Amino acid sequence: MADAASPQARSALADVWHHGRQGRTDGMAGVRVVERSDVAVASIAARKGQAAALATKIEARTGLVLPVTPRLVAADHLSFTWTAPGQWVAMADGEEGMAFADELVADLGSLAAITDQTDGRTILRLSGTHVREMLAKGCMLDLHDTVFKVGDTAVTPIALITAQITRLGDEGSVAAFELAVMRSFTQSFWHFIEVSSAEFGLDVS
Amino acid sequence: MLLIECPHCGPRAEIEFRCGGEAHIARPADPSALDDNAWAEFLFYRSSPKGVHAERWNHAHGCQRWFNALRDTMSDRILATYPAGAARPNITTIEAAR
């Protein structure tokens, strides 16, 4: 049993997902899914009238320009994703959640309200030759490359569960998307992914 | 499915939104100076035109921001959307929206 003083982070999917191949078993899996669990996540909401000052400070510290439209900016291990006017989600690969949020608060606390979301969200990376067909069963957006371009992001219901979907760069020659849902909706969302991917074959890793 | 153009997110499906009733109704600066009739008028009296109507809408399942829309109540067509606080576009007929 884990030490009560230092609880271990546990994926919201731990009870429901099975690694390996699911659904159609012949040929290549049409949909591949990976959970991003080694990432720190924090929400940033600019204080009243401070959005410009916040953007200036973040650019000075990181070289990244906070997007003012639904876009993702990323460099090295750090990224900022637009979620609403004056609101962003910051993600840092390989960092510990609270430490990352504390670091942001120390730096930007006077300009923005910052909250650790690392354990509050499940982040999945989906790719594959049939990932768009699979997402189309629950997502109302047009995900074609000419409309939803690399770096575009949107907060929208997918299978009636509010999610943030971001178009990442291609993985090999196939499109990749990042999906973030609130932790408490993760198991329902996972059910949508499993049943919607079955006809194409689903590879979980 | 009706597509509504959120001023922040772009065109989205109608079910992402909630309608919040008539737009551009300013709260009286000094409510205690009003008589009951004037206060009731502010609270409850709304226009219900046949044609172009300015309404408040909320992008509830997206950016969660309020904005305003001009909607034709006969065809249910959204003629224009604009951020909260912006002036109402000068569209009074459906023809003017084209």
Image (spheres, coloured by chain):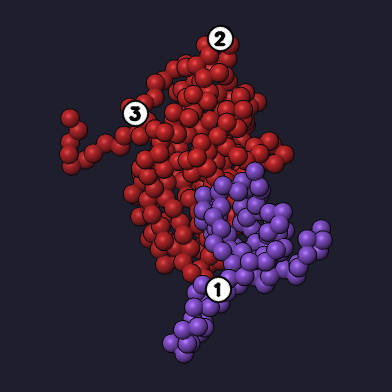
Chain colours: A red, B purple
The residue positioned 61% from the left and 52% from the top of the image is B9
- The amino acid type, in three-letter code, at marker 3 is Ala
Label 3 and label 2 in one chain: yes
Q: Which residue is mark 1?
A: B45
Label 1 and label 2 in one chain: no
Q: Which residue is mark 3?
A: A14
Image quarter in which the C terminus of chain A is found: top left
Residue B18: horizontal and vertical position, in percent?
Answer: 54, 55
Residue B59: horizontal and vertical position, in percent?
Answer: 55, 55
How packed mark 2 is, by other alpha carbons closer than 10 Å (few <14, some 14-19, many 20 or more), is few
- Is label 1 in contact with label 2 (beta carbons under 8 Å)? no
- The amino acid type, in three-letter code, at marker 1 is Tyr
Is residue B80 visible from the viewing direction of this image? no
Q: Secondary structure at mark 1?
A: loop
Q: Which mark is residue A26?
A: 2
Is residue B21 visible from the viewing direction of this image? yes
Residues A184 and B54: in front is B54
How packed mark 3 is, by other alpha carbons closer than 10 Å (few <14, some 14-19, many 20 or more), is few
